[in-house]
Structure formats: C-alpha cells, structure tokens
C-alpha cells in the first residue's frame, strides 16, 4: 500500500461510501488558539496560548516538532504581565521566526499588537515590541515576503472616528524600523477580521470583512499593493446574507485564494466558500468547499508555489464540532473528498494549517470540558485523488467576479 493509501484509509470520507479508521493525532500541549508555520526544511513550529500562573492571564508559547516527531518543551515568548490573545506565526525564507499577538494591559485594558523574533530556531527571543501603538488593536495577521520582509495587518479604530478599520505596516530590515501604519480599508462602517499573504513576487495581498454592504450582511473585500499604493477594494463575497471569517493564501504566478464562511445557501448552516483570482484581480465564480449539513466555520488555508492548496475548518455535522479538510494539487481546480479528523467528545475549533515538503500539517484546539489542548495531524499531499467541486449559485453570483462586475 502506497503512502497515500495508508493516509487515505486513516480518515472518514464524510459523504463517501465507506466508513474508515481515524488517523492518529498527536497531543502537543494544554492550550488554545494555535497557529502553525513551516520552516521549509521539513519541520514545523507552533504558537499557542496557555496560562502559566493563573486563569486570568494567558501567555504566548512556542514549540517545534523535531525530527524524532516529538515536540520541544514550550517556551514563553510573550514574557510579560499582559493578557495575550490571537497569536500568529510566520517563518522567513532566511529562517528567522516572527511571532505576533494581541497584548492587553491588565491594568488599563489597552490592546496593542506585539512582535517577537527568533534567529536561532526558537531557542531565544527578542523582547516583545509594540507594533501597532494605536490602542484598541486586535485580530492581527502577518506574512513574510521572499526578501524576508515582514508584513502585519490588524483591526483598530481610525483616529477621530468610531469605526474600526484595517491597518498595515511592514519592515524590510528585520523589524528594526517599520513603515507608518496605513489605514488600508478606509470604510465608513466597520472593517474587521483581516488576513494577509505575500505572493512570490513580493506583493502584499489583504482581505477583510467589511460592513459597508450592511451591518446584517458584511462582505469580504480584497486589495493588493502595486507600485507603492493599494488597489481599490474589491467586493469578493458580494452575497445576499452574512459573510464571515475570511482567509487568504497566494500560489504561483499571481494566484490568489480567498476563503470565507457564507450563509447565502443555508442561512443557519453556513458553508466555506473559496474564490480563486489571478494577478489581474479577476476572480472566478466561488466554489463551495465544505457543502456539509452542519455549521462550517473558522476556515484556514495554506498554499505553496507548487499549486497545492489545503483548506481546513470546524464543522458540526457529526453533532459536535470536528475538523474537516480538503486538498487540491492543481491550483484549486479540483479537490479531494472532504476529509474528517477523528471524532471527539468535545468540540474541535480554531484550526490552522501549513504546507511543508510533501505534507500539510494541521493544528487545532480541542475542548476537554475542564480545559483545552492542542492537537496536531499530518496530511500527506502526494498521489491524492481529486475532482471538481460544485460552484455556488446564489443570485449575486451569476457570473465570474471582476472589477467590472
């Protein structure tokens, strides 16, 4: 049996004809809100939250999967009295690890985005640096460029307004200096839940959720940075009901993959949709990635320069929230059948995914009732059978999306 068949028989194919054994998963540590990134050399690292002193304050911890398939002892990266949330991690082509999170001052309640870096594989870390300095900052994301540049986005209130917007900054010298924070959403309403990815030519791509379409039906908007300025925001979801939780990844030759939760087809059991665009900012009609009877939520996406795309999400179809996934090996033209991680007693939430070599690696939070733990699984990518998915068919998507729609 080849490597894929070993893996294939380790999953339940959610809507297939066979009921198969569950793939083994690894318990990493007690904690919550995990994020994962690839070193490109065959190993991966994670960041997550855990309470080291009391339940009121959470720290950001870091661990690496070693060649013997064991995890290093978690290291406290945040190392301060602030209550931390929403960690994220990226690894530069040169090997430096960048880790960000939202830090809330316990005394004042002021929130800002902090960054710490490690140049020795996570053994030692810089002191956390306040990147946002805007206050009321949250929901950050980061990406690194092929030139080791660092790009960060977050949600915050614009000066002199009550509306939240998406801000962007970057550093091209290892985090020593940063560009002036830019309001890249400029919405008259509310912008939230930003995501960022940098393509193989070094261009930053950003998407977020925006209520300029209406408070009850916010949409996913997208921009990219060209020639030192940002393109006009493009409404990607443009759906008649609620859109939420956008995610973003870049592939080869200008490919852009945007995912989100959409309620248009099933108001009370939303699906994960995916729109694929090119460097001319033309997006094809969205495809339905999850298409399950339950509530699909919290999608995460990873893509690489070989045209492989992996999407994972939390889904309530089995009665509790489990982690599902789908894989494409041809730039999202075709996908595998829905893959189901092992059923659990508690809810599985907050998945995150990365690609490293010929495998994808997923982490998620598992609720144990009295606490939560971080779970991990490997998904091989070689020789996976795929097929086309159904395009979505709401009224607002009669044709492909472009800047002229």
Image (cartoon, rainbow, N blue to C red):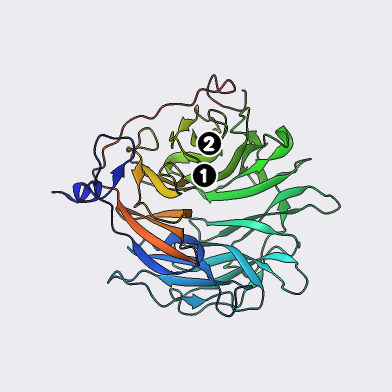
Determine whether label 1 and label 2 are within 8 Å by CB. Answer: yes
CA–CA distance in space, label 1 to label 2? 7 Å
Q: Position of residue 10 (x, y in %)?
A: 25, 50
Residue 21 appears left or right of 178: left
User: Which residue sits furthest left?
Assistant: 1
Q: Position of residue 221 (x, y in %)?
A: 63, 38
User: Which residue sits furthest right?
Assistant: 160
Question: Which type of secondary structure does the marked residue at label 2 adopt?
Answer: loop
Q: Which comes sooner in the sequence, label 1 or label 2?
A: 2
The part of the image, by quadrant, that contains residue 117 is bottom right
Structural crowding at the residue carrying mark 1, measured as other residues with C-alpha within 10 Å and reported as few (<14), some (14–19) or many (≥20): many
Question: Which type of secondary structure does the marked residue at label 1 adopt?
Answer: strand
Q: Is residue 34 above or below residue 61?
A: above
Q: Is residue 278 above or below residue 23?
A: above
Instruction: Specify the label residue 124 is tagged with.
Output: none
Count of labels in the image:
2
Structural crowding at the residue carrying mark 2, measured as other residues with C-alpha within 10 Å and reported as few (<14), some (14–19) or many (≥20): many
Q: Is residue 285 visible?
A: yes
Which residue is at the front of the view, 396 or 92? 396
Name the residue carrying label 1. 297
Residue at 54% across / 75% down in the picture? 77
Q: Position of residue 164 (x, y in %)?
A: 75, 49
Name the residue carrying label 2. 270
Which residue is at the front of the view, 346 or 142? 346
The part of the image, by quadrant, that contains residue 27 is bottom left
């Amino acid at each position: 049996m080849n490597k894929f068949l070993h893996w294939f028989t380790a999953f339940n194919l959610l809507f297939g004809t066979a009921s198969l054994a569950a793939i083994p998963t690894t318990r990493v540590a007690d904690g919550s809100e995990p994020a994962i990134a690839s070193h490109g050399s065959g190993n991966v690292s994670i960041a997550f939250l855990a309470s080291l002193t009391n339940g009121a304050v959470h720290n950001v911890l870091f661990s690496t999967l070693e060649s013997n398939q064991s995890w290093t002892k978690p290291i406290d990266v945040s190392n301060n009295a602030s209550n931390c949330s929403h960690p994220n991690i990226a690894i530069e082509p040169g090997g430096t690890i960048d880790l960000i999170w939202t830090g809330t001052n316990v005394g004042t309640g002021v929130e800002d985005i902090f960054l710490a870096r490690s140049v020795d594989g996570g053994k030692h870390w810089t002191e956390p640096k306040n990147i946002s300095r805007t206050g009321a900052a949250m929901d950050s994301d980061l990406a690194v460029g092929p030139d080791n540049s660092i790009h960060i986005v977050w949600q915050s209130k614009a000066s002199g307004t009550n509306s939240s917007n998406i801000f962007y900054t970057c550093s091209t010298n290892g985090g020593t200096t940063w560009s002036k924070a830019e309001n890249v959403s400029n919405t008259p309403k509310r912008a939230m839940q930003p995501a960022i990815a940098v393509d193989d030519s070094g261009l930053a791509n950003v998407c977020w959720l925006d209520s300029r379409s209406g408070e009850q039906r916010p949409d996913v908007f997208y921009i990219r940075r060209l020639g030192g300025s940002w393109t006009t925001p493009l409404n990607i979801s443009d759906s008649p009901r609620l859109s939420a939780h956008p995610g973003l990844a870049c592939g080869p030759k200008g490919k852009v993959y945007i995912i989100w939760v959409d309620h248009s087809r099933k108001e009370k059991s939303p699906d994960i949709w995916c729109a694929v665009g090119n460097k001319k900012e033309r997006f094809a009609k969205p495809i339905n990635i999850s298409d399950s009877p339950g509530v699909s939520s919290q999608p995460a996406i990873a893509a690489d320069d070989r045209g492989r795309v992996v999407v994972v999400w939390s889904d309530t179809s089995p009665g509790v929230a489990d982690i599902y996934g789908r894989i494409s090996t041809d730039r999202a033209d075709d996908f595998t059948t829905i893959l189901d991680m092992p059923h659990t007693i508690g809810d599985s939430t907050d998945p995150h995914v990365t690609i490293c070599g010929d495998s994808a690696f997923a982490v998620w939070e598992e609720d144990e009732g009295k606490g939560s733990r971080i779970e991990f699984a490997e998904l091989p990518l070689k020789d996976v059978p795929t097929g086309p998915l159904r395009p979505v068919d709401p009224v607002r998507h009669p044709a492909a999306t472009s800047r002229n729609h």
